[in-house]
Each structure stands twice: as C-alpha cells, then as structure tokens.
Image: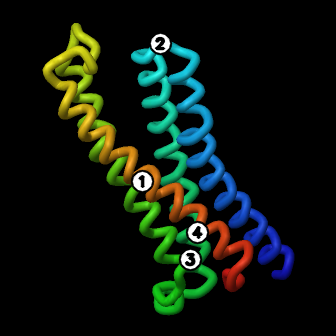
Amino acid sequence: MRVMTSLTNLLFHLALTAWTGMLWSIGYLVTPVLFYTQEHALAGEIAGHLFNVSGWAGLALGGYLLLVLLLRQGLKASLRTLAFWLTALILILTAVSLFGIQPFMRHLKESALPLDVMRSAMRDRFVAWHGVASMLYLLQSLLALALTLRVNFGKPVQ
C-alpha cells in the first residue's frame, strides 16, 4: 500500500509539474521565440497548433490531478481544499479556451481567406479575441503556478 501511495504522489507531482511547465514554456518562451524568428502568419499557425496540443494535454493532466484528489480525500473533503478548486478552475479555463475561443479564432482566420486575418476585415475581431485568449492564458498560468507552489511548499496534498 505504501508503494502505491508513493507512486501516486510521484505521478501527481510529475503531472502537476508537466502541466505548469507546459503552460509557462509554450506561452512565455516558445511562442515569443516563434514570433521573433518566423514570419508572423507561420508563427501564429505553429503557436495555434502548440496551444491546441497543450490544451488537450492539460485536460488529461488536470483530469488526472482532480481524480487523484477525489480518490484520496473523497468529494466532501476535496471540495474544502484550495488544491481542488485551483485545479478545477484551471481545467475550466482550459476547456473554455480549447472548445470555445480557439475554434472561434480558427473560424475568423478561415473567414478571412484568401487574405491573412491580420490584413482582412476580421482583423479587429481577431485581435479582440486574441486579447481575451491571452488574458485567460495568463490567468491559467498564474493559477497553475499558485497550485504548484501550494502543493510543493504549502499544506501537503493528502
């Protein structure tokens, strides 16, 4: 039983670290480098694919974290923990981005064809929604950092 608990703890921390690291590295390292080194439309296309893949990975990792919290503590006790609510909120923001904002932005880009969206009548709407997506991403990143700090340096997760 002790080995399973240790393995579960290890996997929990790895999943949390991977999720937080993915958010920060893609959003604040990889994407800026893409836009600095590549043509704007290509950088945007690659970044869009990276955010899509990281969104799906985030759903899987966050789902695993919630499942572990629920199985360890039960529903009632989990609902009283900050770790549970931070994880749930990050997951909700991930889903909003993945299933709402990203498809809408893809639709705007497709509607602008054959022009680049930034040279089309869709530009203002795209810029506005890109701003919304960026703010949600920043919020996700900060919440993930808070969750990581809470789990690693705060009260231990049961």
Question: What residue did someone put label 1 on?
Answer: 94
Check residue 83 in the rendering and tell me which mark sits there, or answer none.
Answer: 3
Check residue 39 in the rendering and tell me which mark sits there, or answer none.
Answer: 2
The answer to which of marks 3 and 1 sits earlier in the sequence is 3
* Mark 4 neighbour class, 10 Å CA radius: few under 14, some 14 to 19, many 20 or more: some
Q: Amino acid at mark 3?
A: Ala
The answer to which of marks 3 and 2 sits earlier in the sequence is 2
Question: What residue did someone put label 4 on?
Answer: 146
Is 97 positioned to the left or the right of 38 in the image? left
Residue drawn 46% across the image and 62% down it = 90
Given residues 13 and 41, the one toward you in this image is 41
Q: How is the image coloured?
A: rainbow
Q: Amino acid at mark 2?
A: Glu
Alpha-carbon span between mark 4 and mark 2: 34 Å
Alpha-carbon span between mark 3 and mark 2: 40 Å
Asked if disc 3 and disc 4 are in contact, CB closer than 8 Å, the reply is no
Given residues 54 and 125, the one toward you in this image is 125
Relative to 150, is 115 above or below?
above
Judge depth for marks 3 and 4 and give the one in front: 4
Does any portion of residue 98 appear in the rendered image?
no
Q: Position of residue 15 (x, y in %)?
A: 66, 58
Q: Position of residue 59 (x, y in %)?
A: 48, 54
The answer to which of marks 1 and 2 sits earlier in the sequence is 2
Q: Secondary structure at mark 4?
A: helix
Residue drawn 65% across the image and 50% down it = 21
Q: Position of residue 63 (x, y in %)?
A: 51, 62
Q: Which quadrant is the N terminus positioned in?
A: bottom right
The answer to which of marks 3 and 4 sits earlier in the sequence is 3
* Mark 3 neighbour class, 10 Å CA radius: few under 14, some 14 to 19, many 20 or more: many
Q: Amino acid at mark 4?
A: Ala
Judge depth for marks 3 and 2 and give the one in front: 2
